Amino acid sequence: MFIRKDYQQEYYQKNKKERLKYAREYHQKNKEYSRNYYKRYNEERREEVNERNREYNRDHKKERNKYQQKYFQKEENRERRREYMKSYAKDYYQSHRKECLDNLKRYFKTPKGRLALKTVRHNRRTISEKCSKLTIKKVQLVYERNISKYGRLVCALCNKPIKFGEDSLEHFIPLSRYEEFPYRDLNALNNLGISHRKCNSSKGTKTLEEWRNKNM
Ligand SMILES: [Zn+2]
């Protein structure tokens, strides 16, 4: 018996290469259109899409992490992500400003949030003569600036979102290197960011520049 579906499948398999090539070409030519199409599709079926993604990610955690790691090794991909996060976050933050900041305030009242601020008091004692004071207010400002840039905490090192409790204060030039940078105030806002604890400790005593060179 002739079954249409089988035939189609066979046809597809036989011509896979050409069809993929065609699809790629089509996509290249109609980039704007496809992008808008998927954007609309995702917006209209947000719940459904989110659930599907969650399920997929649960089942493919390992592959996904591996893929992501490879993907973000390329600077151009990191840059793309930064751009995306910026454009997405701008709208989000503007419409959720109060909510974002309230979240942060609530976080600082949890044990982990208090700990994040406590670390600061420790640092402040260490090299207080060389740098400006690292006040809790200043650190809160670093957090606020980070959130206002992206609508949520985002790691200054890997550019991925940070869950509350996995955050840490990042000195782009580490305090331990202050002797090499006598002219710089390492506790100034421009030397401070928020990063994953993991990223922070992998950076260790490297400067941001040294760390980037090594991780590229
Ligand atoms: Zn990170």
Image (cartoon, rainbow, N blue to C red):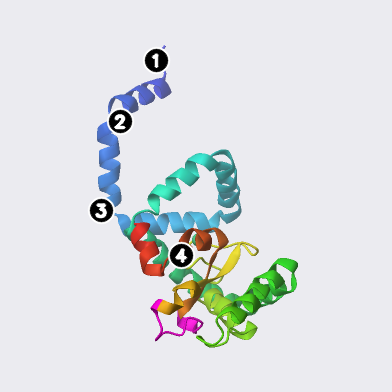
**In this rendering, would 77 be left or right of 155?**
left
Give the mark nearest the N terminus, 3 or 4: 3
Measured Cα–Cα span from mark 2 to mark 1: 22 Å
Q: Position of residue 176 (x, y in %)?
A: 49, 72
Q: Mark 1 highlights which residue?
A: 2
Residue 87 occupies which quadrant of the picture?
A: bottom left
Q: Position of residue 108 (x, y in %)?
A: 70, 74
Give the mark nearest the N terminus, 1 or 3: 1
Q: Mark 2 highlights which residue?
A: 16
Tell me what residue is drawn at x 65 percent, y 71 percent: 116
Q: Which residues are drawn in magenta?
A: 180-190
Mark 3 Cβ and ligand 1 under 8 Å apart: no
SS state under label 2: helix
SS state under label 3: helix
Measured Cα–Cα span from mark 2 to mark 4: 40 Å
Q: Mark 4 highlights which residue?
A: 157
Q: Amino acid at mark 2?
A: Lys
Mark 3 or 4: the one toward you: 4
Measured Cα–Cα span from mark 1 to mark 3: 36 Å
Tell me what residue is drawn at x 46 percent, y 85 percent: 185
How many numbered circles are shown? 4
Mark 4 Cβ and ligand 1 under 8 Å apart: yes
Q: Amino acid at mark 4?
A: Leu
Give the mark nearest the N terminus, 1 or 4: 1
Q: Amino acid at mark 3?
A: Lys
